[in-house]
Image: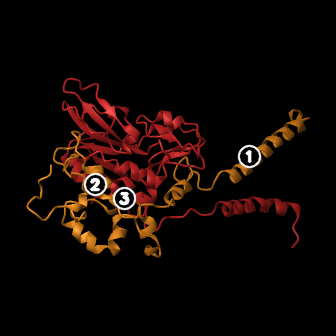
Chain colours: A orange, B red
C-alpha cells in the first residue's frame, strides 16, 4: 500500500520513544527501593528502620527480673503504679547491658525528685498528695519517708501531710 | 558458552530483575510481631494528670528530641467560671521543667498532655509530596527520614501542631508512639514514666485490651472531632474549652 511508503522516520521516532521508556523503567527500577509500595505509597522498609531505633528506657519488666525485692515492696505501697525509670531515669544502659554492674545508676536526690510530683499547686487534682515548702522544714524527704519505694511513714503521723 | 546477540538480548531483562532484587534485599520482620494484629492508640485521663512533665522528659530522652521541640508536651488550662471560650493556656518549655505553682483560686485548672493523635485519616499524610509520611498497617503515623525533603508541608497540615522540622536532620519529626518499643512488647516512654497512669498505650485490635471497657463506660472525646481526622488519642474528662 502506498500509505506505508516513506514511513521509516516515523518508526525511528517511535523506536526512540520505546527506548526512552525502557531507559525510564530501568532507572526507575534502580532508584525506587523494592519495598516502596509494599503496603502503600511509601517505603515499607521505613517501618523496619523506625522499629530498629535504640531504646533508652528499659521498661519496668527488665528492672523486676533482678530487683524483685524492690518490686514487692513497691507493690504494697502508694507508689505501686510508679514505674522504676519514672524516678531513676533512663536505665537501658544498665538493665540491658551484658554486665549491669558496669553502669551503676546514680541514686536520685529526694530533695529535688519528690517535689516534681508532690509540690503543692492549685492546678493538681485535689485527691493527689501535695506538700508546700513548710512541710519538710528544709529536711530531705527521705529523713521521714525512709523508704521511697513505699513512702508512707510507720508512725501515726501517716497521712498528716497535706 | 557461545551466545548470539538475540540470546543475550533475551536474557537481559531476567538479569535486570535478578540484579534489582539483589540490590533491594528483603524486608526484615520483627520476631513475633505482626502488624496486621495491632491498631495502636492512646488513652489520656485528664483527671489523673498532675503536670509533672515526666512524659515530656522521658520522650525527649528516648527519642533524642532536640531542645525546644516536642513530640509530646503538656498544657495547663485555667478556665474562668464566666469565660469558657477564652481559657488561659500555658506550656512553659512544653512542661519539660514542670509548671509554676498556680495561685489564683478562681475557676478551674487542669493539665492536657498532647501528642500526635495518630489519625487514621490524617491530613499530614495526604499532603506529603514524596510519600515520606504515612500511616503504617498497625495505625502509627510515621516519617521516613530517608525520603523526607523537609518541605514542612505536613507541619502546616497537622491541625494539632504535633510536627516540627528537626533542626539537625532537616526532616519532619513527630511522635511515632515509640514504635521501636511497642513492637518489642513494651509501652511507650511517656506511658512507662507517667507516675499516675494518666497515659495508657492501647491496642484497639486486641479484644483483651482494657481500652474497650473504658471507652464504653466513660465520657471520652478526641481533639477537634469536627476535622474528621480519625484521631486515635482518646481523652477522658476533657473539658469543652480545650482546643
Q: To which quarter of the image does residue B225 belong?
A: top left
In the rendered image, residues at marks 2 and 3 fall on the same chain: no
Work out whether disc 3 and disc 1 sit on a shared chain. Answer: no
SS at badge 1: helix
For label 2, the crowd category at 10 Å Cα-Cα, with few meaning under 14, some 14 to 19 and many 20 or more, is some
Q: What is the number of callouts on the image?
A: 3
Residue under label 3: B187
Residue drawn at x 91%, y 35% is A6
| Residue B171, placed above or below residue A67 | above
Sequence-wise, the earlier of marks 2 and 1 is 1
Q: Nearer the viewer, residue B13 or B95?
A: B95
Q: Is residue B23 left or right of residue A51?
A: right
**Is residue B138 found left or right of B236 in the rendered image?**
right
**How crowded is the residue under tag 1: few (<14 C-alpha within 10 Å), some, or many (20+)?**
few
Q: Which residue is mark 2?
A: A114
Query: Residue A79 location in percent, x, y?
Result: 23, 60
Give the alpha-carbon distance from disc 2 to disc 1, as whole Å: 64 Å
Out of B178 and A123, give the one closest to the viewer.
A123
Q: Is residue B168 visible?
A: yes
Q: Which of the two marks, 3 or 1, is nearer to us in this view? A: 3
Q: Is residue B203 visible?
A: no
Quarter of the picture containing the C terminus of chain B is top left
Chain hosting mark 2: A
Name the residue beneath numbered marker 1: A24
Q: Which element is circle 3 on?
A: loop
> Gap between marks 3 and 1, in whole Å?
45 Å
Task: Chain letter for mark 1, please.
Answer: A
Quadrant containing the N terminus of chain B in the rendered view: bottom right
Q: Nearer the viewer, mark 2 or mark 1?
A: 2
Amino acid at each position: 500500500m502506498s500509505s506505508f511508503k516513506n514511513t521509516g522516520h516515523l518508526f525511528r521516532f517511535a523506536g526512540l520513544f520505546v527506548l526512552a521508556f525502557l531507559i525510564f523503567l530501568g532507572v526507575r527500577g534502580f532508584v525506587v527501593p523494592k519495598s516502596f509500595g509494599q503496603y502503600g505509597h511509601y517505603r515499607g522498609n521505613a517501618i523496619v528502620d523506625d522499629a530498629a531505633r535504640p531504646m533508652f528506657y528499659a521498661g519496668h519488666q527488665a528492672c523486676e527480673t533482678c530487683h524483685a525485692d524492690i518490686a514487692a515492696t513497691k507493690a504494697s505501697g502508694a507508689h505501686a503504679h510508679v514505674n522504676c525509670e519514672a524516678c531513676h531515669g533512663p536505665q537501658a544502659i544498665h538493665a540491658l547491658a551484658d554486665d549491669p554492674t558496669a553502669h551503676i545508676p546514680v541514686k536520685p536526690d529526694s530533695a529535688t525528685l519528690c517535689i516534681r510530683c508532690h509540690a503543692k499547686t492549685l492546678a493538681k487534682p485535689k485527691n493527689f498528695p501535695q506538700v508546700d515548702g513548710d512541710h519538710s522544714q528544709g529536711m530531705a524527704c527521705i529523713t521521714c519517708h525512709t523508704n521511697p519505694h513505699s513512702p508512707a511513714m510507720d508512725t501515726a503521723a501517716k497521712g498528716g501531710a497535706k | 558458552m557461545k551466545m548470539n546477540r538475540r540470546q543475550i538480548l533475551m536474557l537481559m531483562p531476567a538479569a535486570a530483575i535478578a540484579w534489582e532484587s539483589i540490590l533491594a534485599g528483603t524486608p526484615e520482620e520483627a520476631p513475633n510481631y505482626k502488624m496486621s494484629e495491632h491498631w495502636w492508640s492512646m488513652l489520656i485521663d485528664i483527671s489523673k494528670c498532675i503536670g509533672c512533665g515526666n512524659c515530656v522528659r522521658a520522650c525527649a530522652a528516648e527519642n533524642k528530641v532536640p531542645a525546644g521541640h516536642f513530640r509530646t508536651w503538656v498544657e495547663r488550662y485555667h478556665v474562668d467560671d464566666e469565660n469558657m471560650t477564652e481559657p488561659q493556656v500555658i506550656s512553659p518549655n512544653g512542661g519539660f521543667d514542670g509548671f509554676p505553682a498556680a495561685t489564683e483560686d478562681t475557676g478551674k485548672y487542669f493539665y492536657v498532655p498532647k501528642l500526635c493523635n495518630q489519625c487514621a485519616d490524617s491530613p499530614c499524610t495526604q499532603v506529603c509530596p514524596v510519600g515520606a509520611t504515612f500511616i503504617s498497617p498497625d495505625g502509627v503515623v510515621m516519617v521516613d527520614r530517608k525520603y523526607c525533603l523537609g518541605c514542612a508541608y505536613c507541619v502546616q497540615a497537622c491541625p494539632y501542631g504535633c510536627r516540627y522540622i528537626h533542626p539537625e536532620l532537616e526532616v519532619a519529626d513527630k511522635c511515632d508512639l515509640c514504635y521501636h518499643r511497642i513492637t518489642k512488647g513494651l509501652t511507650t516512654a511517656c506511658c512507662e514514666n507517667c507516675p499516675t497512669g494518666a497515659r495508657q498505650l492501647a491496642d484497639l485490635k486486641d479484644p483483651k485490651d482494657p481500652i474497650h471497657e473504658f471507652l464504653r463506660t466513660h465520657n471520652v472525646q478526641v481533639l477537634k472531632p469536627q476535622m474528621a481526622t480519625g484521631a486515635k488519642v482518646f481523652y477522658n474528662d476533657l473539658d469543652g474549652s480545650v482546643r
